[in-house]
Amino acid sequence: MLRHALLGLLAERPMSGYELDQRFEASVGSTWTAGHSQIYPELNRLAGEGLIEPGEPGPRGRKTYAITDAGVAAVREWLSETDPDRTVRDESALRTYFLWLMEPAAARAHVESERDAAQETLRSLRATAAARRPATPAERSQRIALEAGLRWAQARAEWAEWALDRLDSVAEDAA
């Protein structure tokens, strides 16, 4: 997936590895994580496969990479001819499944933490959305993806409030 994310980002414009790392974190970093130690070797692999081309080294040896026609074809093929992996490994959801094994205060703290994390994600994504005015096809599709994140975070925050109500009613029933 990292290779396709890098190709997609380079389809917007040529970038250095550093710029890609920053752009990756600012754009898809909330859904897919990768650090320098993963990005730079992948750039070398993509260049070796002819999917990107490194430009002439700039200041301090910084290389700028540009996507090739073969790279555009590869990312388009991935987008249109493969089904996404929709499995999600969510440690928090797994912990929630076992709330009954926690002391009531710890269970409540877990759900409050989930609510707080969802609300922080919402604040961050709303700020990002407010700062953008999509003008290009790439920016419009990025805004659509951002909306998916906003709705997911909103649903997660609403679920946490619902769960806290249920935890409170269980505590009242036990009293």
Image: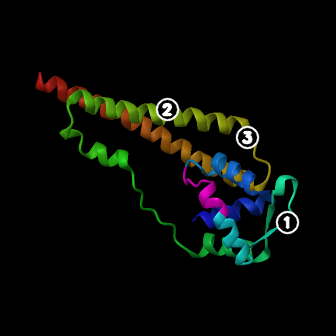
Residue depth check, mark 1 versus mark 2: number of the one nearer the observer = 1
Considering the image in quadrants, where does the C terminus appear?
top left
- Within 10 angstroms of label 3, few (less than 14), some, or many (20 or more) residues? few
Q: Report the disc number at residue 55.
A: 1
**Which residue does the image show at 29% across and 43% down from the upper left?**
96
- Measured as percent of width and height from the top left, residue 125 is found at 60, 38
**Residue identified by numbered label 3:** 132
Q: Report the disc number at residue 13.
A: none
Query: What's the distance in space between the residues labelled 1 and 3, CA to CA?
Result: 30 Å
Question: Which three-letter amino acid code belongs to the residue tagged 1?
Answer: Gly
Q: Earlier in the sequence, mark 1 or mark 3?
A: 1
User: Left or right of 52: which side holds 45?
Assistant: left
Question: Which three-letter amino acid code belongs to the residue tagged 2?
Answer: Gln
Answer with the quarter of the image where residue 100 lies. top left
Question: Which three-letter amino acid code belongs to the residue tagged 3?
Answer: Arg
- Measured as percent of width and height from the top left, residue 83 is found at 52, 71
Residue range corresponding to the magenta coloring: 31-40
Query: What's the distance in space between the residues labelled 1 and 2, CA to CA?
Result: 42 Å
- Within 10 angstroms of label 2, few (less than 14), some, or many (20 or more) residues? some
**Which residue does the image show at 26% across and 46% down from the upper left?**
97
User: Left or right of 79: which side holds 53?
Assistant: right
- Measured as percent of width and height from the top left, residue 61 is found at 83, 57
Residue depth check, mark 1 versus mark 3: number of the one nearer the observer = 1
Foreground residue among 162 and 53 = 53
Answer with the quarter of the image where residue 99 lies. top left
Q: Is residue 4 magenta?
A: no
